Image (tube, grey):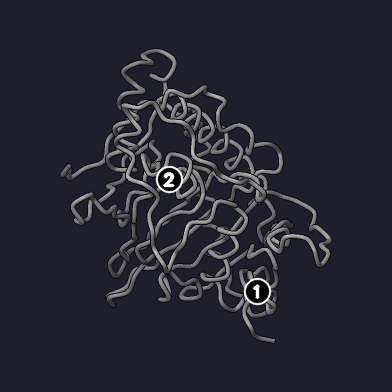
Amino acid sequence: MVTQSLPLLDLTRFRTDRARFLTDLRHAAHEIGFFYVTGHGVPESLMSEMFTAARRFFALPLADRLAIENIHSPQFRGYTRTGQEHTGGTPDWREQLDVGPERVPVQTGPDDPVWLRLIGPNQWPAAFPDLRATTLAWQAELLRTSLEILRALAASLNQPETYFNEWFDDEAAHHLKIVHYPGTADSLQGVGAHKDYGYLALLQQDTIGGLQVQSPTGTWIDATPIPGTFVVNIGEMLEIATNGYLTATPHRVQTPPPGTDRISIPFFLSPRLDAVITPLHLPEELATHARGITQDEANPLLATYGENALIGWLRSHPPVARRWWPDLTNTS
């Protein structure tokens, strides 16, 4: 299939025009793995407030942002300076704030899975205390929306809507990023080509484009911003769960030109860290089109989500890994 744009789906049709909506959703998720969604019910006022809060955060003095730098967090939470996160081994030209569920750190023993150490609190800027409430309200709305999309995907695969519920209780490991891409004339990657390792990602982007999605033919499709929508993509856990009928699609971000910048706020729907993903039983008419799980020696897909997540964090944030995870990085 060759396409130059991403499908646009109205989520309200899941309840009002179910059969045709599920057909459209299944087509978009199987053929491309990316689509826009409207009719999501997230208040426009909250979407606007989230962008305003993001710009206010990145306008803080550097010292205030560095006070919550992620080097202080074993859970990789907090602020990351431009060029400090890596994708494909290359620095990304972006600064960001990573936020996860507000949790108490787990005291682990020698026999516990190491990924339990990913559980812990967020860091919030003392110079901007209102950021916490706005961000957590936005996070709750995106969690609600992404779970509805996940229910629709289950139904589109001829499964009960509740099929994936087992791993999405109060211990689920969803997280979000508030990202700022500074404009530059240099040939730098905003984010290098990669796949997401959770179930779904929902992206709120501003009016400045930059996200590109790899088509089945290998060309790159611009995910041009559409006001009021989220860009949704399939993650690696859904690829495992569907034996590749749904495939996590490579995507990247181009840096904005000089004199401008870009704000992007992705939310990643992820299960409990102890979730073990097993393939579901697809109807024969779908199973015959399953591609199998992607085999990539540089990025093996593991069935336990906590293992996948930890590998991704360690690979993306070397300074944090060296400080807090020396037992896994062979450093001290």
Query: Which sits in the foreground, 291 or 195?
Result: 291
Quadrant for the C terminus in the image = bottom right
Q: Position of residue 136 (x, y in %)?
A: 64, 44
Q: Is residue 183 left or right of residue 270?
A: left
- Asked if 229 appears above or below 22 in the picture, the reply is below
Amino acid, disc 1: Ile
Residue 61 percent across, percent down from the top left: 58, 71
- The residue nearer to you, when weighing 82 against 65, is 82
| Foreground label between 2 and 1 | 2
User: Secondary structure under badge 1?
Assistant: helix
The residue lying at 32 percent from left, 73 percent from top is 184
**Split into 4 quadrants, where in the image is the N terminus?**
top left
Badge 2 local density, few (<14 within 10 Å), some, or many (20+)? many
Give the mark nearest the N terminus, 2 or 1: 1
Q: Alpha-carbon distance for marks 2 and 1?
A: 32 Å
The residue depicted at 51 percent of the width and 69 percent of the height is 316
Crowd rating for badge 1 (residues with CA inside 10 Å; few <14, some 14–19, many 20+): many
Q: Position of residue 212 (x, y in %)?
A: 29, 55
**Looking at the image, is 185 positioned above or below residue 75?**
below
Amino acid type for the residue under numbered disc 2:
Glu
Whether 92 is drawn above or below 196: the answer is: below
Q: Which residue is more in the foreground, 161 or 14? A: 161
Q: Which quadrant of the view contains residue 320?
A: bottom right
On screen, residue 48 above or below 43:
below
Q: Is residue 238 left or right of residue 140?
A: left
Give the residue drawn at x 42%, y 30%. Answer: 282
Residue drawn at point x = 44 percent, y = 64 percent: 299
Numbered mark located on residue 239 in the image: 2
- Say left or right for 147 vs 273: left
Q: How many numbered circles are shown?
A: 2
Name the disc covering residue 71, or none: 1
Element under label 2?
A: helix
